[in-house]
Amino acid sequence: MTTAPIAVFDLDGTLADTAHDLVATLNVILGQEGVAPLPIEAARDMISAGGRGLLERGFEVARREPTPALIEELYRRFIAHYFDNLCVETRLYPGALDALDRLERDGFRLAICTNKMEAHSVKLLRALGVAERFATICGRDTFPWFKPDARHLTMTIARAGGDPRRAVMVGDSYSDVAAAKAAGIPVICVSFGYPDRPIREHGPDRVIDHFDALFAAVQELLAVEVC
């Protein structure tokens, strides 16, 4: 019996626009240290680097040099505050829900592979009403490895009961592209996420500007990879 194809999604900047809630938490924590709030425009390209990267950007803009110990303490506060405030303004991107529906109708299994902490990811996806659609939700702390390590992706696929030969990754950043390429899995990137530089420079197999284009891109890539 042939294993169902699987589409593995990143979360922040791919399925959901989480920037406002992440930066709101960042600014609460920076404010506790007397650091001026950071506008979203100055933080977007660091979102894929996670909470520590955002904190470091905030101090960099303020021309302050925090110690590693302080960053770790602030990161703990960041994680705790964000957990309680992760779906205030966060929304699925336009067309994301329809794209998930279309993939499911065509027999695809769905999974999440994100560098967001697993508990945060599960809570957010539940709040957005889509958690039950995914065979597994794997975060930064689910396995000993995380993106761009290919094992984060391949172990997510295994945990979801998928086959890497019938898999596609959907993301928005370098870590998604690098993990997929290292695993030998085709990767589609959205153009509206939070990459550190223009996503086409990282060399994904396809770039889409709206989720309306996702299904056709997935079908094209898997037809090439599997047939």
Image: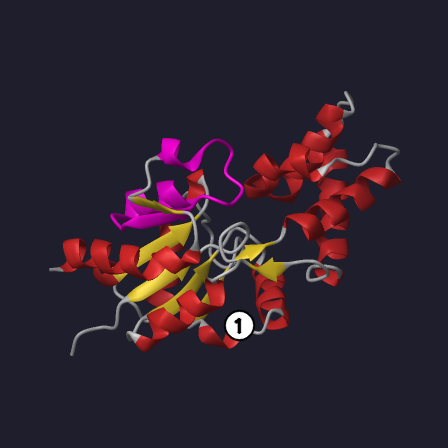
Image quarter for residue 70? top right
168 vs 92, left or right, is left
1 vs 12, left or right, is left
Circle 1 crowding by C-alpha within 10 Å: few under 14, some 14–19, many from 20: some
Indicate whether 106 appears above or below 71.
below
Q: Is residue 183 located in the magenta-colored stretch of the structure? A: yes
Q: Is residue 112 located in the magenta-colored stretch of the structure? A: no
Check the picture and name the quadrant holding the N terminus.
bottom left
Q: Residue 92 versus residue 161: which sits nearer the camera?
A: 92
Q: Disc 1 on helix, strand or loop?
A: loop
Image coordinates of residue 53 in percent, x first then y, are: 63, 36
Image quarter for residue 216? bottom left
Image coordinates of residue 54 in percent, x first then y, are: 66, 38
Residue drawn at x 69%, y 39% is 40
Image coordinates of residue 119 in percent, x first then y, are: 61, 64
Residue hosting label 1 = 130
Residue drawn at x 44%, y 69% is 98
Extent of the magenta region: 176-202
Image coordinates of residue 145 in percent, x first then y, are: 45, 49
Instruction: Tell me, yes or no, if residue 160 can be seen here.
Output: no
Q: Residue 33 versus residue 67: which sits nearer the camera?
A: 33
Q: Residue 80 versus residue 88: which sits nearer the camera?
A: 88
Amino acid residing under circle 1: Val
Residue drawn at x 64%, y 70% is 127
Check the picture and name the quadrant holding the C terminus.
bottom left
Indicate whether 71 appears above or below 223.
above
Indicate whether 71 appears above or below 226.
above
122 vs 215, left or right, is right
Instruction: Tell me, yes or no, if residue 101 can be seen here.
Output: yes
Residue drawn at x 71%, y 25% is 60
- Residue occupying the far left of the picture: 227
